[in-house]
Amino acid sequence: MGGRIHQECAKNFQNTRSKRRSLTKLFQRYVWGKQTALQLGAENHRSVDWIRRQLDKAEPKGFQLLPQPVVAIADVIFFGREYGVLVFRSFDLRQNLFWTEVKSETAAVYQEAK
């Protein structure tokens, strides 16, 4: 009888916990596993654009920065010729404050991030 009630209500149910887990895993492989969006796309049989959209949705847990004066260290690490990640990190807080994907390392990229 329970099955018939489910069919009659015409509602779809999804396991959102599983989606959150896979999104967290994807984010961790990107940040801590140093996997590129291209590598993650190949592993998950998805496009690079899909991977980037998922990474944009991911919010790392426990990251909260209160307004305060900081000294930030900034640098770009490249994973190939035209794909890099610009990171602003606070030495004192021991946290990354900001990161973004870049194609080249220019003064304009740093200024825009600042």
Image (tube, grey):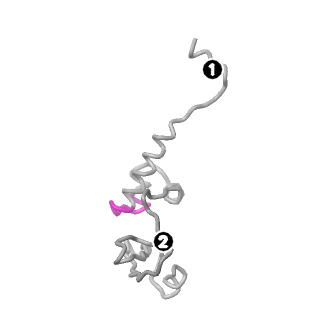
Q: CA distance from mark 2 to mark 1?
A: 46 Å
Q: Which mark is residue 25?
A: none
Question: Which badge, 2 or 1, is on the more N-terminal residue?
Answer: 1
Location of residue 17 in the rendering, given as x and y in whole percent from the top left corner: 47, 41
Callout 2, which amino acid?
Thr
Is residue 3 left or right of 97 when viewed as pictured? right
| Position above or below: 13 against 87 | above
Residue that badge 2 annotates: 100
Image quarter in which the N terminus is found: top right
Residue that badge 1 annotates: 7
Q: In percent of the image, x 42 and y 51: which residue is there?
A: 24
| Nearer to the camera, 98 or 42 | 98
Q: Residue furthest bottom?
A: 107
Location of residue 51 in the rendering, given as x and y in whole percent from the top left corner: 49, 56
The stretch of residues the image draws in magenta is 31-39
Q: Is residue 34 magenta?
A: yes
Q: Is residue 44 magenta?
A: no
